[in-house]
Image (tube, grey):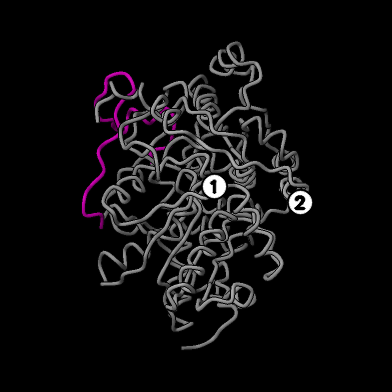
Amino acid sequence: MRKMRKVILSEKEMPTQWYNIQADMPNPMQPPLHPVTRQPVGPDDLAPLFPMELIMQEVSQERYIDIPEEVQDIYKIWRPSPLIRAINFEKALDAPVKIYYKNESVSPAGSHKPNTAVPQAYYNYKEGVKKLTTETGAGQWGSALAFACGFFGIELQVFMVKVSFDQKPYRKSMMNTWNANVVASPSNLTQAGKKILSEHPDSPGSLGIAISEAIEAAVSDPGTKYSLGSVLNHVLLHQTIIGQEALKQFEIAEDYPDVVIGCFGGGSNFAGISFPFVRENLTNGKSARIVAVEPKSCPKLTRGKFTYDFGDTVGMTPLIPMFTLGHNFMPPKIHAGGLRYHGAGPIVSQLLKDKLIEASAVPQKECFEAGVKFARSEGIIPAPETTHAIAQVIREAEQAKREGKSKTILFNLSGHGLVDMAAYDQYFAGGLEDFSISQEEIEASVRSLEVVPA
């Protein structure tokens, strides 16, 4: 076994195909349903929102899908990303573990999100689309799509969840620098936003609300399409370049993880790092544990209900089979804005239902404590979302120490926190809260979903 601090692939070794886990899932997902007819949606139902190539990827059962050369050329600005052995972090934890992380913070936008932003912008460009709308939580997705749209001359309107719009002003600055227009959601630009503001003038917003606004703005203009940064199958597909690179890098290091960890909002970075390893479990006799880590304040995987639900608050999206807290659930105002989402992607939901992956929930203060410990040993200040994965790494290390068993851990460092320093300031000042969601609150939120077919 080779002890390597950093494993770097050459441009020639970058994967040229995305991996589609739908080809290997033992149980297929239930189909998404039309929000009005409750019948399975078809390509024509999605055509007002997405270019046809993305729709075809959404429903594809092909195991591998070619990455267009134009997309590969842009990927090569930052890809392949390095796999790094966190030797100093291992020493700090003093446990019988080896810890590796895939460093997705090296992209120009500072996160994993350009892995899908670039192909989405490309396919819209190829179909002649001139303008896109989207939502963003913490701003990582919005900034990534703004970056990507610049390559193809596409105009972008971003609806940014209000609490993050206020907490993270420099995310807005990044989007403006890349020529996107950004407004706080709920806004007065859409009927959905106006309705919510009339009922809740001080609404902090949510990803569900921002999705409603972005979809309404897209379908109201024939020349505009909608772009989504997580949840849907084609989005998760594009992210699998992360895990495929990691598999190659572990071959070079002559090592293999016992546990693969990713933070979880809708599923994009978690799927990106984990799906190729799930494939190895399903087809090649491997047995790595796969762990999705969510906020304790937004626990759809660990405490939500598996049923059909809307992906947005107003009910404009198809009904999606997923673990959910209910589309009207308003998550507390945690700093990990990218994880403040009521539901989970349908593929991840099915894998969890089939017990092929695990889920864990971590409180906010434990996450920031983990992020600081990582930064002080490895030097990288992680995004608040990524600190959830790091907190789970520490839990795994502590368990290994108690049991006296060695363990190799891989996690996805999905983004840096250099524009999230206000959150760290609040942590150091003792101003962060741990939010508790009662079972009664969850049951009340999902009760309205009982009439939706399961």
Q: Is residue 48 magenta?
A: yes
45 or 96, which lies in front?
96
Could you tell me if residue 152 is visible in this image?
no
Q: Is residue 48 left or right of residue 193?
A: left
Mark number displayed over residue 428: 2
Q: Which residues are magenta?
A: 24-52
Q: Residue at x 61, y 30 (%)?
A: 159
Amino acid tagged 1: Ala
Mark number displayed over residue 117: 1
Report how many numbered discs are placed on residues in the image.
2
442 or 179, which lies in front?
442
Q: Badge 2: few (under 14), some or many (20 or more) residues near its Cα, within 10 Å?
A: few
Q: Residue 156 appears at what percent x and percent y?
A: 62, 34
Q: Is residue 39 magenta?
A: yes
Q: Residue at x 46, y 38 (%)?
A: 127
Q: Is residue 32 left or right of residue 149?
A: left
